[in-house]
Image (cartoon, rainbow, N blue to C red):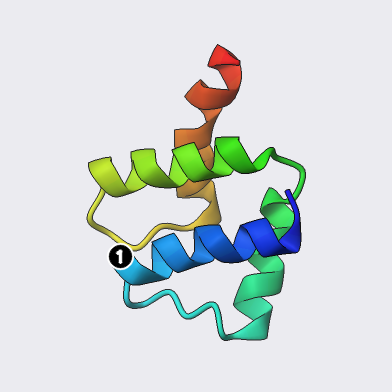
Amino acid sequence: MTEVEMLKSEDMLQANYQFLDFSNSVLHETWFEMLQRFDFVEVREGVKSYMAAESKTPTVHDLLEHMRPIREKN
């Protein structure tokens, strides 16, 4: 996943979870470092899955848990 694609995922997350502030460079860099090895479609679908199932602000671990079934299906 590219950094531009990560920004799209961050926009989706930040729109739904106000406590995520990706304008904080450390938060952005940390999440990008953890997720860049994945395909953008996997991340986007994981974000959608998380938003549909959870109301609490996600951690990277939470999102990875929702991406796992998507990756296994592909």
Q: Is residue 3 left or right of residue 69?
A: right
Report x, y in % for residue 12.
42, 61
Decide which of 43, 5 is in the foreground and name it.
Answer: 5
Point 56% across, 43% down: residue: 43
Circle 1 residues within 10 Å: few <14, some 14–19, many ≥20: some
Q: Who is closer to the viewer here, 3 or 17?
A: 3
As drawn, 56 above or below 44: below
Task: From the viewer's perspective, tell me whether residue 51 is left or right of residue 12.
Answer: left
In the displayed structure, 42 sits above or below 26; it is above
Q: Position of residue 40 (x, y in %)?
A: 63, 43
- Residue drawn at x 69%, y 63% is 4
Identify the residue position indicated by label 1 in the image.
Answer: 16
The quadrant where residue 53 appears: top left
Query: Which residue in the rendered view is the most extreme toward the top?
Result: 73
Numbered circles on residues, count: 1
Against 15, residue 67 (above or below) is above
**Residue 2 on image: x %, y %:** 75, 55
Residue depicted at 46% across the width and 37% down the height: 45
Q: Is residue 24 left or right of residue 32?
A: left
Residue 36 x %, y %: 74, 51
Kindly state the secondary structure of the residue where label 1 is placed: helix
Left or right of 72 on screen, residue 16 = left
The type of residue carrying mark 1 is Asn
Vertical position of residue 48 compared to residue 30: above or below: above
Within the image, what quadrant is residue 42 found in?
top right
